[in-house]
Image: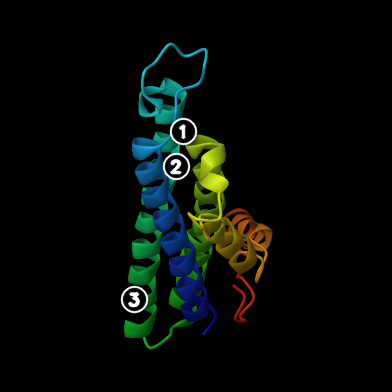
Amino acid sequence: MGAIAQIIQAAVDVGIAKAAVRDTIHFVRKHTRPWVDSNLEKGYEDPLTLYNLGNVQIQVHASEALLRRAGEFLDIANESGLEELKVVEASIAVAEAKALATEAALLATNKLFELAGTKSTLEEFNYNRHWRNARAHTLHDPVRWKYYAVGNYFLNGVYPPRHPWL
């Protein structure tokens, strides 16, 4: 049950990240002004904005890919009749997906404000919901333990604990 519960949590985090990216793109295209020293006409032309948005988008796409991969591992574990090694492999794959989904959600929600600018913090846009949702949701089970479990499995062959938080 742990891997099933965790993949759902990872999917929530990916959804939050995708919504934040969507709103970042919308706001930057419509409202963001260029930095005074950039000598640019539009905020969305800023090379640092483009770089940062590209980085966030790559992280979100990577999270989606790991989420899909984790789902495939869960399918294999179920098809095996829940053979121990297959369950362990699924748990590790889900831990990887959850770790990256957490990082992507936090990155995307923070970058929303950084790239969109001060106006994006106004209550009328309600963009703070993305950061608040990501921050609250990712606290349920500390991601640092996902990294620990993945590292311990690959380096030392130690199977992860079997509980709903991994």
Residue 16 - label: none
Label 3 neighbourhood size at 10 Å, few (<14), some (14-19), many (20+)? some
Residue at numbered disc 3: 76
SS under mark 2: helix
Q: Amino acid at mark 3?
A: Ile
Q: Position of residue 47 (x, y in %)?
A: 41, 21
Marks 2 and 1 in Cβ contact (< 8 Å) = yes
Question: Label 2 to label 1, Cα distance in Å?
Answer: 6 Å
- Which of the pair 166/90 is nearer the observer? 166
Q: Amino acid at mark 1?
A: Asn
Label 1 neighbourhood size at 10 Å, few (<14), some (14-19), many (20+)? some
Residue at numbered disc 2: 56
Residue 52 - label: 1
SS under mark 1: helix
SS under mark 3: helix
Closer to the eye: label 3 or 1: 1
Quadrant of the rendered image containing residue 64:
bottom left
Q: Position of residue 34 (x, y in %)?
A: 45, 23
Closer to the eye: label 3 or 2: 2
- Which of the pair 100/21 is nearer the observer? 21
Question: Label 3 to label 2, Cα distance in Å?
Answer: 30 Å
Task: Answer with mark 3 or mark 2, whichever residue precedes in sequence.
Answer: 2
Look at 60% across and 81% down and name the residue there: 164
Q: Position of residue 22 (x, y in %)?
A: 36, 51
